Amino acid sequence: MTTRRDFLSHSAAAAAALALPRIARAATPQFVEFKARPAAVQLAPPSYPKTEIWGYGGGMPGPELRIAQGARVRRTFLNELPQASSVHWHGIRIDNAMDGVAGLTQAAVEPGASFDYDFVAPDAGTYWYHAHNRSFEQVARGLYGALIVEDAEAPDVDREEVLILDDWLLDPDTAQIDPDFTSRHDRSHAGRRGNFIATNGKYDLALDVRQNERLRLRLINAANARIFVLSLAGMEGWTIALDGMPLDSVEPLDDVLVLGPGQRADLIVDVTADPGETAHLVRIEDREGMSQVAFPVSGTASAARRAPPATLPRNPDVQVPDLESAVSVRLNMQGGAMGTLDAAVLNGERKTFRELVDANEFWAFNGTIGMTETPLADVAIGQAVKLEVYNDTSFPHAMHLHGMHFREIGQDGALGPLRDTLLMFGGETRTIGFVADNPGDWLYHCHMLSHAASGMMTWMRVT
Ligand code: C2O
Ligand code: CU
């Protein structure tokens, strides 16, 4: 018997064999407008005033964009902010011209102007969109939302929740966003970390559940710099996807889940707590657990527990890099407080670390601060790339590659899961591999956005 899944994978294989352009599968929808504009939202508890934010559609988070796998997205972005902006579709293996990187793939969209984004989303999974001009400020002001690409065959769950985790740096009296976005301390240390933690813009998000209910949680770390360390209480869970891409096999979540800025994780969780109790997504800080999201349990969904979830079907045409034929690229990350950087090139001139501090620039890749004229690597389309990254700093960094997913290459040569952002701790050397199969100029940067703004940004060219 041919199952639906067999049919889908056969037709996907047939499409790949014919090398049909991805766009051929999608109908042509109309352009839909969406605006970025200032707004006020009740972020802090109700005894505080509303917080002035910048939001897509005036909301925070912005509207959830939910589409079918392979669908074409057409959105007219209207900028009603007092600053130029652009929109990046984080994790989508996208057409380069639509990647939304102001200064690299498009000009920033001036206040009052608009830009038409038109792309196809080839991969099912949990993605997000966010501002990509002055992102250290614009993301901190609230310019982001979830981009969910639905699976052709969804896993069997009772319901699904998208949880966008963020922290905000607020004035403790007025609940307004701290406007010092270029703080020398934040830039040179762990980045801009907030004093107020929220999920989906709510400080006390609570979702009613029932015992034995099965949920899919789509977690997105939208924070400028905070690493969320999470665990479950009153729930049993499995990780089924990371950074949008399905894992080869589901992994029980017995310990903690570490989510760096920009990263996502899809979990399947079964509520095990008894009716009347509260289950939690727990945030671990300084070894203490705090509730990030509460799940009060009322009633029972079913008498029996279910079998562990199945793996998700793979996304199409993600090539496995051939390490033998790969070109090797090396990246040394240097700088920051307590680092070893004593000089680096800034805008073509060699500067001492003292001069860099005065310029509010702190981080170097291979001895150069920020974007270079020539790319870190210029590779032919289809070439396998092995990128060895050494974090010679005292801080963790969340290294994000645009346009293509990669796999970590272990010491033993084994390939890790597909990711678009890799969290690296100080002193670590980690190697990633990917097939450069998406033509264009692709950014590679730290997703701790103050770090990116003060040097941790480079790019690769695929032609
Ligand atoms: Cu999510 Cu270059 O960013
Ligand atoms: Cu960093």
Image (spheres, grey):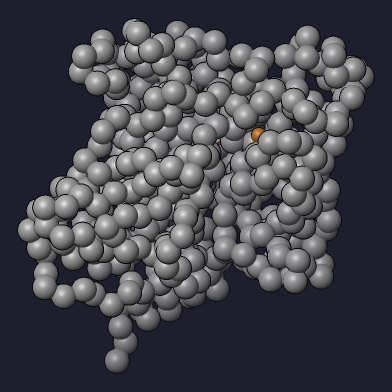
How many numbered circles are shown?
A: 0
| Residue 242 image position (x, y, % from top left) | 48, 56
Q: Name the foreground residue: 58 vs 266.
A: 266
Q: Quadrant of residue 250?
A: bottom left
Question: In the displayed structure, does residue 372 sit left or right of residue 249?
Answer: right
| Residue 74 image position (x, y, % from top left) | 38, 38
Q: Does residue 139 lie above or below 307 as drawn?
A: above
Q: Image point 55% across, 24% down: which residue?
A: 192
| Residue 341 image position (x, y, % from top left) | 86, 28
| Residue furthest to the left | 299
Question: In the displayed structure, does residue 371 sit left or right of residue 15?
Answer: right
Q: Image point 37% across, 58% down: which residue?
A: 267
Q: Image point 30% across, 83% down: which residue?
A: 3
Q: Quadrant of residue 169?
A: top left
Name the image quarter holding the N terminus. bottom left
Q: Quadrant of residue 454?
A: top right
| Residue 396 image position (x, y, % from top left) | 65, 39
Q: Image point 21% across, 40% down: which residue?
A: 206
Q: Can see residue 377?
A: no
Q: Quadrant of ligand 2?
A: top right
Q: Name the foreground residue: 411 vs 327.
A: 411
Q: Name the foreground residue: 174 vs 316.
A: 174
Q: Can see residue 60?
A: yes
